[in-house]
Amino acid sequence: GESVGLHLPTLSVQEGDNSIINCAYSNSASDYFIWYKQESGKGPQFIIDIRSNMDKRQGQRVTVLLNKTVKHLSLQIAATQPGDSAVYFCAENRDDKIIFGKGTRLHILP
Amino acid sequence: KAGVTQTPRYLIKTRGQQVTLSCSPISGHRSVSWYQQTPGQGLQFLFEYFSETQRNKGNFPGRFSGRQFSNSRSEMNVSTLELGDSALYLCASATGGGNTDTQYFGPGTRLTVL
């Protein structure tokens, strides 16, 4: 079946480096994508979103890239900080439901 | 503005019992969605309510039900609890304006079924 998925379950990054979290999706009709961050003991927190008519969108220290040709989404976090340690989910809004990927745990090395 | 609140935060029940969870959305939000989060299945959509009507539904058995009140507060109910229902139940609120509506999540209710 169609699903939103993630390439790696865990990513370890040195503090201060940039982080890149990848996501693949299979539904070519998907037109809206969201990245969420979930810290331990909390609900998912919206980070940034992108519509399919865009290929890049920037926020504060975060950039989302969308490649519709290969159905790939990535989240880039600049100058990773200890507070960025969390599980990151990509999600697509399909038929008014948010379909989440399995998540990538970002681990920050001191 | 206060965020999404969920009560209770933690709950322990035994198999066969039923449980009701509550969610208060952000003021002004009319859409409330419920999700189940487990280590094995991840985050799965249960249902969405908008203006007291169920607008969308995921693939869960009829033991899972919900409702929304006129003040947009929502409850979900799980009857005849099974061990596999142990999970974090999250609700999210949104203005309800469309499929690019940002959803804001509450902290969740951790349900343990013994």
Image (cartoon, coloured by chain):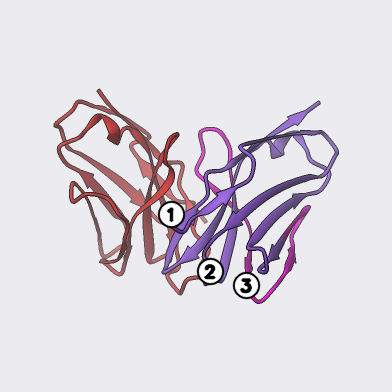
Chain colours: A purple, B red
- Mark 3 → mark 1, Cα distance in angstroms: 23 Å
User: Mark 2 — residue?
Assistant: A30
Please tell me how crowded label 1 is: few (under 14), some (14-19), or many (20+) other residues with Cα within 10 Å: many
Frontmost residue, A21 versus A29 = A29
Residue at point 46%, 74% (across, down): B98
Name the residue at 63% across, 45% down.
A7
Does B16 appear above or below B99?
above
State the CA–CA distance, disc 2 to disc 3: 8 Å
Residue annotated with mark 3: A52
The magenta stretch spans which residues?
Answer: A37-64
Pointers 2 and 3 in contact (CB under 8 A)? yes
Name the amino acid, label 2.
Answer: Ser
Q: Amino acid at mark 3?
A: Ser
Same chain, labels 2 and 3: yes
Rate crowding at label 3 as few (under 14), some (14 to 19) or many (20 or more) other CA atoms within 10 Å: some
Element type at marker 2?
loop
Check disc 2: other Cα within 10 Å, few if <14, some if 14-19, many if 20+: some
